[in-house]
Amino acid sequence: MLIKTKFILVGTVSLLATILISFILFQNTNMVGKEIEKDRIITEIQADIFERAILRDDYLLHRDERPIIQLRAVSKDLDQIITQARSVFVSADEQGAIDLLASNKDFNDQAMSQIIAQPSPELQQQLISQILVKSQDNIAIASQLADTSRSKVMGNQQKTIFIVLLLIAGISLIIMAALYFIWRSIGQPLIGLKETAERIAALDFTTTTTTTTSGGGELGEVARVFNDMAGKLKDSYTSVKNANIANQNVLEDLSVEKSEMGKAKAKDEAILASIGDGIIATDPDRRIIVMNKVAEKLLGWKIDEAIGQLYDDIVLLEDEKGSFVPPEEKPLHKAFAKGTTTTAAILYLVSKNKIKFPVAITVAPIILDNNIIGAVEVFRDITKEHQVDKAKTEFVSLASHQLRTPLTTVSWYTEMILKGDVGKVVLKQKKYLEEIYHGNQRMIELVNTLLNVSRLELGTFKIEPKQTDIVALALDVLFEQKPKVEEKKLIVTENFAEDVPMFSTDPKLLRMVFQNLLANAVDYTPKGGAIDLAILWDKKQGEIGIHISDTGYGIPKNQQSQIFTKLFRADNVKDKDTDGTGLGLYIVKSIILNFGGTIRFESEENKGTTFYVTLPVNGMKKKESVT
Amino acid sequence: MTNKQKISGKKILVVEDDAALRHVLRDKFVLEGFAVLEAIDGEEGLTSAVREHPDLILLDILLPKMDGITVLKKLRADSWGAHVHVFMLTNLSDNERVADALQNDAFEYFVKSNVKIEDLVAKVKEILGIQTEPGKLYA
């Protein structure tokens, strides 16, 4: 049964016992009170009887009025007392005794009245003796009453003591029993639990005995819960132990890793310090986290000054026009925005000391798990490259000028002579002069071609898009070929689509394309051959198509792959015509590719060749040159 | 000199530092009936132009003392020079120079090695409104 129940039981019993004892004690007290009252009454009765006797004697002696009056008072008092006694002495015997007492007293009163009335002395004597007897009788009765009550009291008291002792013994037993049960229900299990707890503290996870756990009640619950806890603690302890071992291992591994990383870091730092380009790395907030010595030198900022600063505050860029580059236009920002490597070669860096120089910048974002966690920028002072480029371009310009001037001299002077402006020329002289003139023209053409090639390679060609009528342009170039066409008696056909639109392109460069392709067709087709020029418009693709076909020498299959390479001339024409430079198609391809178009051809030796060119109609952007 | 009609009053100024080219130009234009003035550098060309007020100037770009583009600019700043016909002659292939020249209102631009002297004369005549005489034969 539950401890709770036991406690309730014990409590109830104790309570009852207490009530019982209290009741008994109350009774006892009551009784004692009653006896004291009885005692008082008896004493008072006795006192009154004696006082009446004395007063009677007093009267008899002196025959005064005074004792009679007092006697009456005492009698009245005695009456009252007797009445009180009747209510106090309740048993039958006692009531009988009191009645007798009362009647004796009444007789004495009557007798006294008779005496007062002064009867004969013999009657008086008789009365006095009767009074005496009755008075003594009453004294005896009173004593008897006193004795009886006293013996009753003593008897009760003994009984009471006996009962109380019995009860106390009973209660003690109950208490002992209760304590024993408590010991059994609580004490023992608690000791068991305490032992278990001690064991757990000593890391021994064996559980408590089954008798306790199988027992009912609250402690049985506690014991079971305790066992549960012991079990779980055991598991917990084991897993913590295992985790600790694992952690130890990890720590050891980490330690090894750390030293490896330390070595790697030292190596990286050494490499970084010795790279010849400036390096800046930023975090996603554009704050500089790494910088090397070269960057320090180029930027004019000390490494520890720059670390932690915003990239845009340290790296100031201008474009070639000298206008400040806003942050979103910088390669770093573009790398972050697009997540791809970005390069810029036409920017100028303005260092802390306001020194401006051209830089080539490459920025690559650092991507980890699909997140951009930073960016690395490599930049290089390309002043030298710029100077070299500039020198190259100037050289080409100058060279072209220097080469062309003597060529012009020969050309004009020969022209003048041939015209007869400086004197008559005989036919033979004329022929010779014409050869000189033609030879010179070839030189001029060669110089022009070389100039174009070098400008293409240097990127100095500016693409200046203008709205162009391609058909008109083609016809114009075709017209230039008219003399040769007529000389070789070639049949030229034209096929122009009706709806070829005007489009934005560089007419200067497009002219070169037509010039080269048409000249090739004319030059490499034998007498009486045919040439066709077609210009088409593909609306769906937004492309203009140019087809130039001839019935000429064709290109041998095994050499077709090389036809666009610089200075290449196929074998079959090298013998026939020593004139070509091998640069024309190279130039054409460069220009077409620059336009964003395509070029291909089909050819069969001694049958003919057709070149196919496509040009996109939109999206030709103005291309600036490098210098 | 020749049996050509004298083109009265038409003066040409040739500004060219290369002697051979300058001479042949002079000879040709004289043959064609023009009065020809010569200048061997940019400075001389400018002063000559402003002083003599030719009807047309043949102006080379690469010149000593003052290059052709600068001469052109200064010429155009002058009240008379602002309207004079100028042909830029050069052997440079620089696109930028071409742009410069045309921006400053040169009327024509020729690459010397690519042009025939005959065509040059025809253009000059065209711009000055001189009729080319048909059927003139040269010996």
Image (cartoon, rainbow, N blue to C red):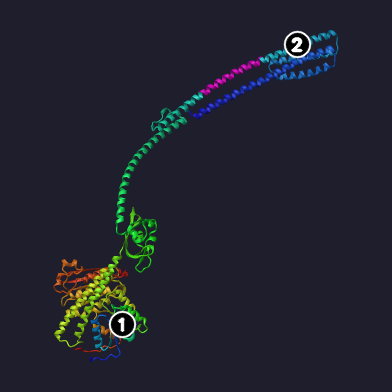
* Image spot of residue A264 (x, y percent): 30, 50
Name the kind of residue labelled 2 in the image.
Gln
Using the rendered image, report if marks 1 and 2 lie on a common chain.
no
Which of A548/A310 is in front? A310
Residue A175 falls inside the magenta stretch: yes
The prevailing secondary structure element of the residues shown in magenta is helix
Q: Can you say whether A394 is above or below A305 in the image?
A: below
The residue identified by callout 2 is: A136
* Of residues A505 and A286, the one drawn nearer to the viewer in this rendering: A286
Magenta part of the chain: A151-176
Q: In which quarter of the image is the C terminus of chain B?
A: bottom left
- Judge whether residue A393 can be spotted in this image: yes
Q: Is residue B46 above or below residue A57?
A: below
Which quadrant holds residue A196?
A: top left
Q: How crowded is mark 2: few (under 14 residues within 10 Å), some or many (20 or more)?
A: some
Mark 1 lies on residue: B44
